Amino acid sequence: MIGFTLAYLMREPFRGRGFFYLVFITPMLIVPIAIGYNFEMLLVEKGPLNQLASWITGREILVSWFAEKIPAFLSIIFIEVWNWTPFVFILMLAGLSSMPREPIEAARVLGANRRQIFFHVELPLLRPVIVLALVLRFLEALGEYPKVWSLTRGGPGSYTETMPVYLYVTSWQYFNISKGAAMSYLVLLIVAAMVYVCIRVLLREKRALEALYRSAP
């Protein structure tokens, strides 16, 4: 949603748009393990974030961001969103830039307002791009390892443990290699099935898009 919103706001030319391109894309260009260690320094108990919060509120705030379940979980979510929103932004901006203008102009001529054009013309035209973004983001999130490992090691307990972290711990810390290998093959089969379903959905969306474009006045 954030990537789509940013792309929608950036689709029209305006002064300083190149600067915002650079700002929005930068998080995706940073090495994941470097992101993990930098946020670890930022979110330690006496780190800059807690010091800033203490300065704003006027009282000492020492939140253990990675020692408690909910703060650790929310921190991982925030960092993951911050890191990969640029990827969705690029996909959506490409979809918006390559969108055919004829159906939009035809809807405008027929008296459709901005809201109707967005929900009944632009969103249907963007459905294949949205599905593709969801699939790629899901696959990337399923394989998330470096940031989680550098920040929490899957802790506290196993509250932020992702599938790759669990497989690593099972295979190389508990030395249950047969179980880890079996789970890896199972994950591979599940991902392959999901990718197959998503490809079918993309083909269906493509056919629907072509039909919509042919039916446009």
Image (tube, grey):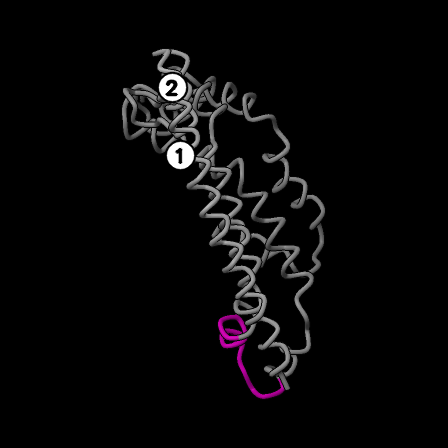
Give the quarter of the image for residue 187.
Answer: top left
Q: Is residue 117 magenta?
A: yes
Considering the numbered disc 1 on the image, is that residue within a helix, a strand or a loop?
Answer: helix
Q: Which mark is residue 186?
A: 1
Q: Which residue corresponds to the image point at 35% horizontal and 33% vertical from the top-left?
A: 74
In the figure, 95 relative to 2: above or below? below
- In the rendered image, the vertical position of residue 207 relative to residue 106, given as above or below: above
Element at label 2: helix
30 over 90 or under it: above or below: above
Q: Earlier in the sequence, mark 2 or mark 1?
A: 2
Q: Which amino acid type is marked by label 1?
A: Leu
Q: Is residue 36 left or right of residue 62?
A: right
* Rendering coords of residue 208 (x, y %): 55, 72
Q: Looking at the image, which residue is at 59% across and 77% down?
A: 211
Mark 1 Cα-neighbour bin, 10 Å: few <14, some 14–19, many ≥20: few
x 48%, y 43%: residue: 192
Judge from the rendering whether residue 190 lies leftward or rightward of residue 31; answer left or right.
left
- In this view, the residue in front, 10 or 166, is 166
Residue at 63% over, 48% down: 90
Please tell me whether residue 36 is drawn above or below residue 204 in the rendered image: above
Residue 129 location (% of width, % of height)? 57, 57
What crowding class fits label 2: few (fewer than 14 Cα within 10 Å), some (14-19), or many (20 or more)? few
Residue 188 % position (x, y): 46, 36
Q: Position of residue 186 (x, y in %)?
A: 40, 34
Give the residue type at disc 2.
Answer: Ser
The answer to whether 209 appears left or right of 53 in the picture is: right
Work out whether residue 76 or residue 60 is closer to the camera in this orientation and state it: 76
Q: CA distance from mark 2 to mark 1?
A: 12 Å
The answer to which quarter of the image holds residue 128 is bottom right
Q: Is residue 147 magenta?
A: no
Which range of residues does the magenta coloring cover? 109-120
Instruction: Provide the residue designation for mark 2.
Output: 178
